[in-house]
Amino acid sequence: MHYIHWEKADSTIVTSLWNKNIGETFPMRNHLMRQNSFNHSQVIKNASWLALNENNELVGFIVGKSSGRDGWIQMIMVDEEYRHEGIGKELLKLSEEGLKENGVNNIALGKDRYHYFPGVPANLQDLQRLVKKSGYESDGFEYDMLGDFSAGVSIPTLPAGVTCELLPFKQKNALLEFLQINFPGRWVEEAEDYFIEGGQGREFLIMKDGGKIIGFARINDEKSPVIFQNTYWTPLFDKKVGGIGPLGIVAEERGNGYGEKLVQAAMAFLSERGIQKIIIDWTTLVSFYKRLGFVPWRKYNTYSKNVE
Ligand SMILES: CC(C)(COP(=O)(O)OP(=O)(O)OC[C@H]1O[C@@H](n2cnc3c(N)ncnc32)[C@H](O)[C@@H]1OP(=O)(O)O)[C@@H](O)C(=O)NCCC(=O)NCCS
């Protein structure tokens, strides 16, 4: 077995290894692999490796990312025919060393920008065992939720003065400012990326009260300029699939029923586009979404490790 840098990887070969191993539950597309693991600026050379057998065939890989002191293992995979030979442990070691060299002091599994998973999928038992043995501590669960809305969804009735509309492109800066004030961090960066990638507004629903933005929801489908996290696994379905999220209501307006109306409106807008199944990804708000017809679909254990 030998280990070489990720930059020598061929995305179609990595995609094939992925699909051979977990494609039935998480079908990878070359386009998505390129978007999240090849073209993303936070992928760290010294933290991303390939494991090759004696015939130079790919049997495992790991992708590490970082931003300042935060590091992430985006994905680690060892072919099922090569497990329990110490390859996963070695890949993790190489990646952790690379991240540390880059100044990282905390490593999370998944949750990176342009992640695949918000943790470790609960069904990947071998991976769960490996990371526990390697000193990662589990601190909770995240869920993806799924709903079938083939029967259609109507726009909800909104209180007087409250509106829900797709973002007019000319209000792009108002949305970015709203996000920056109310939901700073990742959600702002993702919205900025969306506009850089040519987004025109059809993926953002904004809720206003008296003309002032009080909430937003992102809605994604196959026409969106970025393959967004809640549409990663759509090849699993023969129906049209869309995704909702992130979403939020300004803190001072929470608890007034607006969040529920916002999600219903997002469902209705997707339904109008012919979407029958909707995915909400990376959430702990299981009871909130259950009320709206979603059921837990995927479960993830979250893990992190201090490497100071
Ligand atoms: C989640 C969020 C959108 C809910 O908005 P909201 O306007 O407060 O929600 P609503 O008032 O419509 O609540 C509808 C129901 O869901 C329940 N609910 C609201 N927030 C909840 C939460 N965090 N967890 C569980 N249930 C919740 C409410 O209890 C309410 O039920 P009730 O009428 O019986 O009291 C809002 O809390 C928010 O913006 N949070 C920060 C961003 C976020 O977490 N977004 C979701 C990412 S997946």
Image (cartoon, helix red, strand yellow):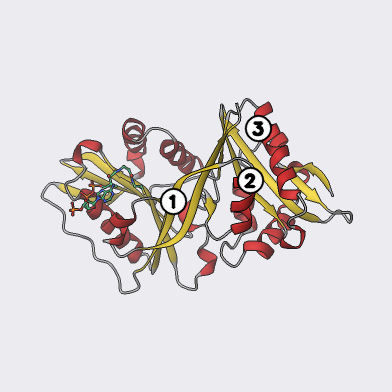
Residue at disc 1, CB closer than 8 Å to ligand 1 = no
Residue under circle 2? 133
Residue 118 appears in the picture as rendered: no
Q: Which labelled disc corresponds to residue 12?
A: none
Residue under circle 1? 142
**Amino acid type indicated by mark 3:** Leu
Label 1 near label 2: C-beta < 8 Å?
A: no
Q: Earlier in the sequence, mark 3 or mark 2?
A: 3
Relative height, residue 292 to residue 52 (above, below): below
Q: Is residue 17 left or right of residue 171?
A: right
* Label 3 crowd (10 A; few <14 / some 14-19 / many >=20): many
Q: Residue furthest right?
A: 54
Q: Earlier in the sequence, mark 2 or mark 1?
A: 2
**Amino acid type indicated by mark 2:** Lys
Give the image location of residue 235, x and y in percent: 54, 66
**Amino acid type indicated by mark 1:** Glu
Give the image location of residue 111, x and y in percent: 51, 43
Residue 192 appears in the picture as rendered: yes
Q: Quadrant of residue 265?
A: bottom left
* Label 1 crowd (10 A; few <14 / some 14-19 / many >=20): many
Q: Which label sits in the foreground, 2 or 1?
A: 2
- Residue at (62, 25) in percent of width and height: 103
Q: Which labelled disc corresponds to residue 99?
A: 3
Viewer-proximal residue among 241 and 91: 91
Relative height, residue 254 to residue 292 (above, below): above
Q: Is residue 164 left or right of residue 108?
A: left
Viewer-proximal residue among 252 and 190: 252
